[in-house]
Image (cartoon, rainbow, N blue to C red):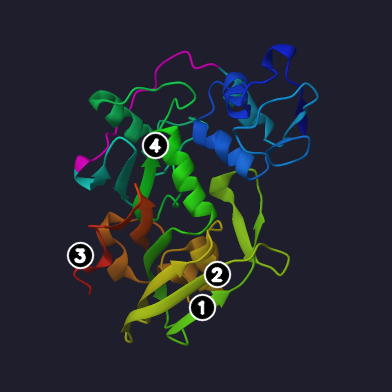
Amino acid sequence: MKQITPSSDDIGQRLDRYLRKIFPSAKLWEIYEALRTKKITVGGKKLPESTKLRAWDILGVDIPEETLRLWQKKETQTRIIHEKLDPNRILFEDTDILIYDKPSGLIVHSPDHKTDEVSLIEQIEEYLVTKWWKPSGTFAHPALAHRIDRDTSGIIISCLNRLSYEHMAEQFRTRKVEKTYHALVVGVPNPREWVINAPLLRLDTGRTDEAKVVVDPSGQPAETSYKVLKVWTKSDWSLVELHPKTGRTHQLRVHMAHIGCPLIGDRRYGGPNVVRFPELKDLHGRRGHLLHAQEIRFELNNQEVIQTSKKNFTLSGLL
């Protein structure tokens, strides 16, 4: 673990502003995520981003060296966004948040910029800047309130200012956000409606896209409720509605594989047999596992918001 001691000039500065200073190429969400997951600590403790630095503080940074080098490097040229945000997929937009119906195959963020692949957050920023949004202060980039995997499609929320980000982060932290997913899975879950309580342990490889999660008694508590919506007996697959109570990495995929009904197309947790359905190969032009973030419920400006995706498996003609 790398240790960093702030200079005397940095004493009294907010923790997040100091981190933005020493890691100029890090996105704001990356800094928040590192603080949340204790990849960056102060005196060995997890502290909020608003913490004011003190003279005796020592920061612990448990970030791969390659990532740190990229964070510390000042960008010398503007990244060209070749793939634009699709306005038809914007479900809601105001000065606080933007809700997007993400297609399968689109990464939500690209921390290393090693390839020309454009991330969703880059598309959102480019879209907003051309309209009205201006980076300011410590909020130099839009920040995602949550994540979904590259191959998962559906609803995702981007926050456009600090207040909205902190508001959404608190709702996720206190589990006040309700999310509904639809998945096509191998076989038929038994019973057809149940709650899966199985702790999950992440085997960290240093790269998010290579993360492997397993059910393990020493892992973090994880809870998913499910209900079978439809069964195709001859084809041996089911449409399942999923409600994650917790938000662990790959939770829905691992939990469904754990009960013997992995997501169709999920090679990582389902093995080679999960791609044996040629009639589903080109469903919505998808790649990978068949999981869709169908609906999200949260509070905004003291009112409940219920946002439903306009894209779902029913549009495929299968249902």
Disc 4 marks a residue whose amino acid type is Ile
Name the side, left or right, on which 193 lies relative to 44: left
Assign a secondary structure to mark 2. Answer: strand
Disc 2 marks a residue whose amino acid type is Glu
* Residue position for label 1: 195
Q: Is residue 254 visible?
A: yes
Cα separation between marks 3 and 4: 26 Å
Q: Quadrant of the C terminus?
A: bottom left
Report the number of numbered marks: 4
Q: Is residue 274 magenta?
A: no
Q: Is residue 17 above or below residue 257?
A: above
Q: Earlier in the sequence, mark 2 or mark 1?
A: 1
Mark sitting on residue 223: 2
From the top left corner, tell me how far across and down residue 176 is, in percent: 46, 59
Mark sitting on residue 121: 4
Q: Residues within 10 Å of mark 3 (few under 14, many from 20)?
A: few
Marks 2 and 1 close (CB-CB < 8 Å): yes
* Residue position for label 3: 315
Tell us which disc is closer to us: 4 or 1: 1
Q: Quadrant of the N terminus?
A: top right
